[in-house]
Amino acid sequence: MDTLDRSLVHQLQADGRASYSDLAKSVGSNRAHVAARVNELLASGKVKVIAAVHPRVLGFEVLAHLAVQVSGDNEETLRGIDALDSAVYISETTGTHQIVVEVRMGTMGELYQTVALVSALPAVTGVNVLLYERVIRSLFLGEEPVLERLSLDQTDIDVLRILQQDGRTGFAEIGEAVGVSMSTCRTRALRLIDANIMQIGAITRRNGTSGSIVFGCGMSLIGDASPEVVRLLANVDGVEFVARTIGRYSLVATIATDSQHAYNHIVAQLRSLAGVRHIDTWLHTRIVQERYENTLDQLATLIGH
């Protein structure tokens, strides 16, 4: 991707349904050129715009980060982890741990079973677990959903299902598919976004390596310094994920940068904060799995279907 493509992807991560006119204004180009570039990115499969439903809405109350130590080749271990339904992010990494996994499940008992399964894989010599107490930011999902405002019906689920496949599908087309008017469809979608139940944004397909440097960062803090760190990260381009954690770190983050210099600058900024006691970083050398599409069966159960 060139500079324009990266700028367009950045804008689409914030608002996957942004109009071509708004995108053109944000990147300082003309509408026709921007429309052509966006459509080219989407057609290539490098970028996809989807609706991501917050995992807690889908009944995934337990979210965790597993750092896995492997002796020998990683491939057999990666295949074993990839077979787990709960694994939504798998990456080979540098440092003490060779594989990082993000898992989502319904109960602590399921997490215990998952850790036991990973630990039993032949080449695994250790698994370190971090619980996500609160997801502050993910690739394009924001704060935790307002669950007390969760009142969904089958039409909402049908709208979500279509937007999960293509987040830029027109409201008129969705309305026709689910049997409601365009205005009703728009109102439903905006309500779901406002309650943080879903967010529509762009993801880049990173099977194998990509042009950017993606690194993880685990921070041990003094007292409750997380607001200060979160404020700094909010102003850093490329921050894909931030969570408050229970375990060896207070916060964990994933950040994508374009250069080693940018990586060094971000880490130096974090280390300069008075509330940061210690920082560990690791590079994601090969992202094996990124899974954003989730089944909506749990939502159907909640409304009695």
Image (cartoon, rainbow, N blue to C red):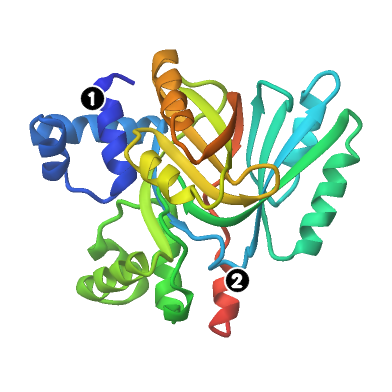
Work out whether 248 lies above or below 134.
Answer: above
- Dot 2 corresponds to which residue? 298
Residue occupying image coordinates x 32% and y 72%: 191
Question: As rendered, which of 94 and 223 lies closer to the eye?
Answer: 223
Residue at the left extreme, as displayed: 30
Question: Residue 198 sits in which quadrant?
Answer: bottom left
Q: Amino acid at mark 1?
A: Leu
Residue at the bottom extreme, as displayed: 304
Say how many tags the image has: 2
Question: Residue 232 sits in which quadrant?
Answer: top left
Left or right? Give the position of 293 relative to 98: left
Residue 280 image position (x, y, % from top left)? 61, 29
What whole-number distance in Å separates the C-alpha atoms at marks 1 and 2? 39 Å
Question: As rendered, which of 111 and 200 lies closer to the eye?
Answer: 111
Residue 200 image position (x, y, % from top left)? 36, 53
Question: Residue 302 sits in which quadrant?
Answer: bottom right
Residue 21 image position (x, y, % from top left)? 11, 43
Q: Amino acid at mark 2?
A: Gln
